[in-house]
Image: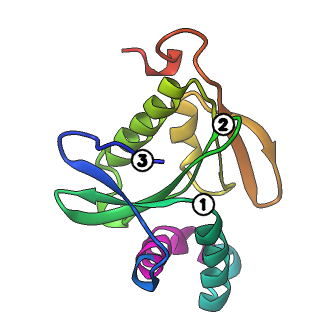
Amino acid sequence: MHLPRLLPDLQFDRLGPSQSDFCYSYEIKRAAMAPHVAPHWGWDEDVQREIHRGHYATKPFYAIRRHEKNIGALSFHLRATDIRLGEFYLHPQWHNQGIGSRILAHCLGVADNMGLPVRLEYLRWNPVGRLYARFGFHEVGRSDIHIQMQRPAPAHGVHPARRS
């Protein structure tokens, strides 16, 4: 699936099977997630790399680029009944600038145009859950580690959480 540009400054380039693409996505994951993972389990490089390798092999990953500079990565996976948004990582230097909200709104717009709900999960202690709730996601499950959320497809036209 092609993920369209987000004008004026963001584009999403599909990452391929090359070692350099995998390493890029893993380095972004480490920068974004180690602060949330390490306090609970430490950061075991081998374990984290293998977890990421499993995700990378089974989902389409995209590099997030701003003005031709790599700033993050995400997985946007079209499935039979929904879109799965995952591994949404921005390098910490790009946090708290509204970029993540813009990207999330853009991805939700793509899903809305397809008439599909969006599902995701995040680490329970990661504060990103507040952002997802603001965009109309609601909890549909939880484990000791993750919270699963879903944002339903719009009934008619624009999704209520996206109206101005």
The amino acid on which the numbered mark 3 sits, given as a three-letter code, is His
Question: How far apart in space, not on screen, are marks 1 and 2 (Cα)?
Answer: 14 Å
Residue lying furthest top: 156
Task: Please name the residue shown 45% across and 72% down the image.
Answer: 25
**How far across and down, in percent of the image, does residue 43 sit?**
61, 84
The amino acid on which the numbered mark 1 sits, given as a three-letter code, is Lys
- Say which mark, if any, is on residue 82: 2
Question: How far apart in space, not on screen, are marks 3 and 1 (Cα)?
Answer: 13 Å
Instruction: Answer whether residue 48 is visible to the viewer in this image.
Output: yes
Question: How far apart in space, not on screen, are marks 3 and 2 (Cα)?
Answer: 16 Å
Q: Earlier in the sequence, mark 3 or mark 1?
A: 3
Task: Please name the residue shown 37% across and 66% down the image.
Answer: 91
Q: Earlier in the sequence, mark 1 or mark 2?
A: 1
Q: Quadrant of the C terminus?
A: top left
**How far across and down, in percent of the image, does residue 9 sit?**
19, 47
Secondary structure found at label 1: loop
From the image, tell me which residue sits under label 1. Answer: 59
Decide if residue 69 is on the left or right side of residue 153: left
Secondary structure found at label 3: loop
Seen from the viewer's position, the closer of residues 72 and 53 is: 53
Decide if residue 4 is on the left or right side of residue 149: left
Using a 10 Å C-alpha cutoff, classify the residue at mark 2 as few (fewer than 14 neighbours), some (14 to 19) or many (20 or more): some
From the image, tell me which residue sits under label 3. Answer: 2
